[in-house]
Each structure stands twice: as structure tokens, then as C-alpha cells.
């Protein structure tokens, strides 16, 4: 089993959502970002400790060579990757960077409208656009502070 599948199986098995994984260039540090969608207050230190302890055991059993494991909440500016995430966060602010420019630009920021049939709807200041989901290189929520 590859490392990503191993991490995802373990995190999901504990009842959490695997949001993202980052690895240092030589794979010596593994960063795992988790969420618990049903929990109002979001992921806390106890959740991170629980996942970290389980992952440490699993990585040891599977003989994965690493120096450091970090487990964290995704933060207010969380990464949005899966179609379900785009649908879940409709109505929130988002920054999107495209792989291939659309309309002469690669960077968009606006209100996330929807995700349907492989397209993400976005309300910009002056108009609405639809972006191909498979053309999105990176997307992050933009937190609002009222």
C-alpha cells in the first residue's frame, strides 16, 4: 500500500476527513491535515493527538521511514480539492489558481457558488465565471472576519 493510501485509510478509519498531505522534499517530514465536518468547533488538539498516535503506530508497523509527523487542522484558509468540498463550502470566499489560463488569467478570487458536472461556479466583483474543476491547480478558502 502506498503512503497516501495508508494515511487516508487510517485517518478515515478513525472517523476524520483527510484534507491534505504535505511531504518535505526527501519525505522526512509528513504533514497531515484533518477535519471533522460534523464538529461545530472544528478539529482540536485532542483530535490531532489521537490521529497522530494512531498514524505513528501504523507507520512503524508498515516500516515507513520518516523523521517527523505533524497532524493539524486545515485552518481557516483550508485547501479545497474534492468536488464535495467545493459543494460543501458554497457561499464562502475562495481563491483559485488555474493550471491553464482562462480569459487571459490564472488567478481568481470571489464567492464560491457551486460545483456541478465538473465545473466550479464563482461570483467575481463584476460577473460570474465557471471554471473547469480539472484545470484548478490550487484552491483555498478566504476567511471572513466581521
Image (tube, helix red, strand yellow):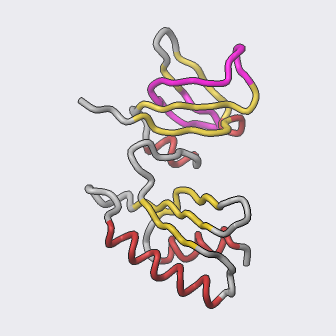
Q: Which residues are magenta?
A: 101-121
The rendered magenta stretch, by its main secondary structure, is classed as strand
Q: Quadrant of residue 10?
A: bottom right
Residue 55 placement, left or right of 49: right
Quadrant holding the N terminus: bottom right
Q: Residue furthest left?
A: 146
Give the residue furthest to the bottom: 61
Nearer to the camera, 6 or 49 = 49
For the image shown, how many numbered marks are present on the structure? 0
Q: Which residue is located at x 54 percent, y 27 percent?
A: 121
Residue 103 against residue 117 in the figure, above or below: above
- Camera-side residue of 85 and 53: 53
Left or right: residue 41 versus residue 134 is left
- The x and y percentages for residue 23 are 65, 61
Q: Quadrant of the C terminus?
A: top left
Q: Which corner quadrant of the image does residue 111 belong to?
A: top left
Residue 111 vs 56, above or below: the answer is above
**Residue 7, placed above or below residue 33:** below
In x, y percent, where is residue 32?
53, 64
Query: In percent of the image, x 46 and y 62: which residue is there?
Result: 34
Q: Is residue 68 above or below residue 133?
A: below
Is 109 within the magenta? yes
Amino acid at each position: 500500500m502506498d503512503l497516501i493510501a495508508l494515511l487516508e485509510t487510517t485517518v478515515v478509519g478513525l472517523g476524520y476527513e483527510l484534507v491534505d498531505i504535505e511531504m518535505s522534499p526527501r519525505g522526512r517530514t509528513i504533514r497531515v491535515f484533518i477535519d471533522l465536518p460534523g464538529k461545530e468547533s472544528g478539529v482540536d488538539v485532542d483530535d490531532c493527538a489521537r490521529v497522530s498516535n494512531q498514524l505513528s503506530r501504523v507507520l512503524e508497523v508498515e516500516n515507513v521511514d520518516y523523521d517527523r509527523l505533524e497532524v493539524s487542522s486545515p485552518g481557516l484558509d483550508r485547501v479545497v480539492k474534492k468536488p464535495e468540498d467545493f459543494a460543501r463550502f458554497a457561499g464562502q470566499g475562495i481563491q483559485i489558481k488555474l493550471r491553464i489560463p482562462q480569459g487571459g488569467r490564472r488567478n481568481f478570487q470571489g464567492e464560491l457558488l457551486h460545483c456541478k458536472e465538473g465545473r466550479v461556479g464563482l461570483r467575481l466583483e463584476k460577473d460570474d465565471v465557471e471554471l473547469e474543476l480539472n484545470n484548478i491547480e490550487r484552491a483555498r478558502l478566504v476567511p471572513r472576519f466581521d
